[in-house]
Image (cartoon, rainbow, N blue to C red):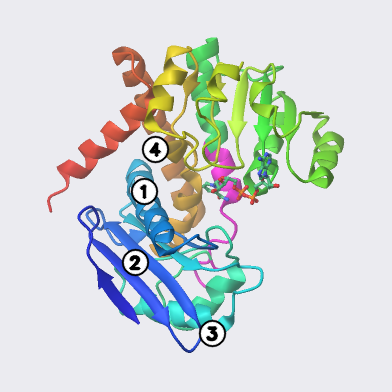
Amino acid sequence: MLTRLSSTTHEGLYRVDDAASGLRGFIALHSTRLGPAAGGLRMRVYDNDQAAIDDVLNLSRGMSYKNAAAGLPLGGGKAVILGDPRTEKTPEKLRAFGRAIDALQGQYWTAEDMGMAPSDMAELAKETRFVAGLDSGNHASGDPSPVTAQGVFNAMLIGSEKQFGNKDLTSRRVAVQGLGHVGWHLCRLLQAAGAHLIVADMDPVVVADAVQTFGADVAAPSDIHQTQVDIFAPCAIGGILNNHTIPQINARLIAGAANNQLASPADADALQDRGILYLPDYVANAGGIINVAAEILQIENRQKWVDEKLTALNATMARIVIRAAAEGISPAHMADRTVDDMLLKVAI
Ligand code: NAD
């Protein structure tokens, strides 16, 4: 049911099968150097097993960087289940996956990712205690999105000071791509700070709501990245910063919640060359994992702890921006280097 596969880049890669429920999935542990590997469980359709393996390897590596940047005693891991979450997710598959997680004896902690809800985490929790993102229970952390949005907002203030000379967002024009869990909370914070919002989402109902609630202007999803704004906040999909979109961007600052915003590392340089300050996504959006970590680590005074970690995250982002400017490189590269240094300092 849990089969170890070989990997030259990761500490552990496992295939998870359960013939009785039809479960097929993978768990990747990129690094446990800082602590147990933590990262969400995603369910989606993949073209084939290799595509799922590539995804889980890539995502788990990203979690090592995010958890380290957030100053958490957690390594990087991730898990995927193959299949359409709307039609192929069953309690039996989730229970079987829970048993697989349990067999790793705490080397891997899971939580929600794409295609998963708190109720699914509750199903996993029937088989293993190594699951977070629960709605109820002693240390349940609930929806991480408000904390993620706060982290993105804080990052924007740092970026504003660097690019515009102050942290005042009054009348700054901000384009928010994606009005989901994080995007919506971010709009609230931006409105309270006096920013003028331009928004886009695939769902016209939520867009109409944003017009009503925030007095936002609307852009088409295909155009939101090229609106005339000061700040662009990608809060929807990965890969939005690529060789097609970057030449069209008018914002001077990019800070958002979406994971893997850069289509390739070279896109960080393309933004840098255009004088656009890009705040590394995994630092800007680490508020969510901080919130989940409080549950994994069973922190008693969670609000105080989360606030302290967010403050430290803010300081890390500020340092990355200053050092990157001093060396004339993208903050994305400086963030990677900062985390590489942190990981190297930890004895194996
Ligand atoms: P969500 O699913 O609640 O919202 C995403 C929104 O984006 C939806 O309203 C969707 O209609 C919209 N959307 C999809 N494609 C779009 C497009 N091309 N143009 C405009 N809108 C589009 O997701 P979320 O929880 O708000 O997360 C947003 C992003 O942030 C994701 O990339 C997620 O991985 C990342 N993230 C989220 C958290 C968190 O705490 N929720 C933490 C870290 C990173």
- Between marks 3 and 1, how big is the CA–CA gap? 31 Å
Between the C-alphas of marks 3 and 2, the distance is 20 Å
Residue 312 is labelled as 4
* Residue at (46, 35) in percent of width and height: 263
Left or right, residue 286 beside residue 84: left
Q: Amino acid at mark 4?
A: Ala
Pointers 1 and 4 in contact (C-beta within 8 Å): no
Callout 3 environment at 10 Å: few (<14), some (14 to 19), or many (20+)? Answer: some
Is residue 311 something one can see in this rendering? no
| Residue 301 higher or lower than 286, as above or below | below
Amino acid under label 1?
Answer: Asn
Given this view, does label 2 or label 4 mark the residue nearer the observer?
2
Residue 131 in view (yes/no): yes
Q: Amino acid at mark 2?
A: Tyr
Residue 113: x and y in percent read 52, 58
Please check the rendered image and state whether residue 71 is part of the magenta-colored stretch, yes or no.
no
Q: Which residue is mark 1?
A: 67
x, y percent for residue 71: 34, 45
Q: Is mark 2 within 8 Å of ligand 1?
A: no
For mark 3, what is the residue?
92
Judge left or right: residue 94 versus residue 108.
Answer: right
Residue where numbered disc 2 is placed: 108
Residue 85: quarter of image: bottom right
* Image disc number at residue 209: none
